Amino acid sequence: MHSSVHCDHHLPFARPSVAPPPLSRPRHPTRAATDGQVGMHFMHPAPVVPLVELAKGMHTSQQTYESARSLAQHLGKSVCVSMDRPGFLVYRLLMPLINEAFFLLSEGVGTAEDIDRSMRLGTNMQSGPLRMADNIGLDTCLYIMRTLHTQFGDSKYRPCPLLVQYVDGGLLGVKNGRGVFQYDPLIHDVIHAQQPHVNLTHNISNAAPSYNV
């Protein structure tokens, strides 16, 4: 999803997305247009996962970075820093794993339950890749895989046809009650009710954590 906003030139702009065009290639490429921009990726579900990824563009200023880091810490999050590349750190690693799980499922190598169980018990993951994909949203997973495939031109990021079929068939995961697994539709409402509502534009330019929550 793309949005257009107008901000004062001194106000840092935090972009809450993980796979749009890089900050280093703005629509109007001037240093002033990019030194106040930083990418912030709150892992889903945000109230539960303690990590926030910060993506620094080529011209992101240290003041902008420190302001975003201060905001994340004020929200009780741990911070990992990535260069501004599609997928950042987590999704660059996670999405190919999820995509491969769909290939295993489509090829009949294992059932959805056994694929997830093997990763939970064999690698100590808290959730298997297919259930994790349902939680993220299968449409979001497909969007990120397509973005990685387009940006890098590498066949290892080619979306699994089964993932495409699920999304085209309206099976999106927890958000609409049915993905690889079936869910109570109330789960989505409960998760969203727990989301913290923060005004990210209030005093984000200050290094001190003074924000409206």
Image (tube, grey):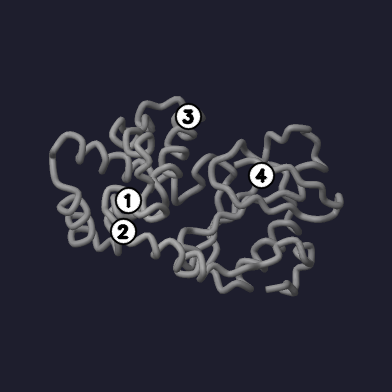
| Residue pictured at 68% horizontal, 38% vertical | 24
Please provide percent x and percent y for residue 157: 38, 33
Q: Quadrant of residue 98?
A: top left
Please provide percent x and percent y for residue 92: 44, 44
Q: Nearer the viewer, mark 4 or mark 2?
A: 2
The first of marks 4 and 2 along the sequence is: 4
Q: Nearer the viewer, mark 4 or mark 1?
A: 1
User: Mark 4 and mark 2: span between their CA atoms?
Assistant: 39 Å
Crowding around mark 3 (Cα neighbors within 10 Å: few <14, some 14 to 19, many 20+) is: few
Q: What type is the residue that disc 2 sits on?
A: Tyr
Please provide percent x and percent y for residue 21: 61, 36
User: Mark 3 and mark 4: span between their CA atoms?
Assistant: 18 Å
Tell me the SS state at disc 4.
loop
Report which residue position mark 1 lands on: 178
The answer to whether marks 2 and 1 mark residues whose Cβ atoms lie closer than 8 Å is yes
The first of marks 3 and 1 along the sequence is: 3
Q: What type is the residue that disc 1 sits on?
A: Arg
Report which residue position mark 3 lands on: 152
| Residue pictured at 49% horizontal, 34% vertical | 147
The first of marks 4 and 1 along the sequence is: 4
| Left or right of residue 107, residue 82 in this image | right
Report which residue position mark 2 lands on: 183
User: Mark 2 and mark 1: span between their CA atoms?
Assistant: 6 Å
